[in-house]
Amino acid sequence: MNKKNLNLPNILAMFRILLAPLMLWFMIDRDNTIFIGWDHSWLDYFAGLIFVIASVTDFFDGFIARNWNQMTKLGSILDPLADKMLVLAGFIGLIVLDRASAFAIFLILSREFFITGLRVVAVSEGRDVSSTMAGKIKTVVQMIAIGFLLMNWPFGEELLWLAVILTLYSGYEYVRDYFRK
């Protein structure tokens, strides 16, 4: 890795990539001998703490990259990858814990895979694939929904369905913009 790519935003994105499987482990491996005697609520708290730390690094890596002029091609790959890994880990864990609608998560993940493929095609054609405001909002709402569902807080399911609507809408925007250009 060259020195330009070894900057704080990319390090934060790589850290987030490492946190995603750790969070998932706390969510789904509750019968592991390491956790014998632990109340499951503590595993939720640790997974939630990891999730909050990862979510905060998501904000800071983008903020620092833009404001300190540290945007790199590697960062443009790592940041959305880290976001997707964190959201995927959260959703898989929530399905295993039976705290979220598998259909809602299917809709969200289907959109994510489709739009990722569309973005790859757009990049190969030399098109701009920057995130839209709707895409950023849907990521925030997805993360809030995951947090609420992980902690078993009220309105988690409603937030999940709001995330589904925003996810599908932002996907529509990507497709619309792709065919307009």
Image: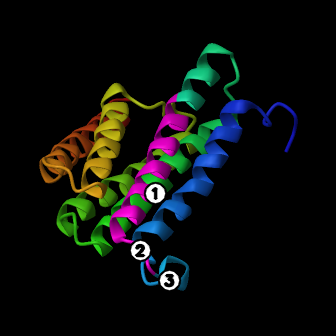
Q: What predominant SS class does the magenta segment belong to? A: helix
Looking at marks 2 and 1 on the same chain, the residue that comes earlier in the sequence is marked by 2
Q: Residue 118 location, x and y as percent?
A: 43, 48
Give the percent coordinates (x, y) of residue 179.
33, 37
Task: Tell me where the magenta segment starts and ends, as one range.
Answer: 37-59
Q: Residue at x 66, y 47 (%)?
A: 14
Judged left or right of residue 176, residue 155 is left
Inspect the magenta stretch and tell me whether residue 52 lies in it.
Answer: yes
Can residue 84 be seen by looking at this rendering? Answer: no
Marks 2 and 3, how far apart at CA: 9 Å
Q: Which residue is mark 3?
A: 32
Q: Which mark is residue 106?
A: none
**On-image quarter of the N terminus:** top right
Residue type highlighted by circle 2: Ile
Residue 70 is covered by the magenta coloring: no
Image point 65% across, 37% down: which residue?
75
Q: How far apart are the alpha carbons under marks 2 and 1?
A: 12 Å
Query: Is residue 123 placed above or below 70 in the rendered structure?
Result: below
The local secondary structure at tag 3 comes to loop
Badges 2 and 1: C-beta atoms under 8 Å apart? no
- The residue at which mark 1 appears reads as 46
Write the residue at 78% across / 36% down: 5
Instruction: Residue 69: give x, y in percent of width and height.
Output: 69, 17
The mark lying in front, picked from 2 and 3, is 3
Rendered image: mark on residue 28: 2
Q: Looking at the image, which residue is at 25% across and 55% down? A: 149
Q: Residues within 10 Å of mark 1 (few under 14, many from 20)?
A: some
Q: Does 130 sit above or below residue 30?
A: above
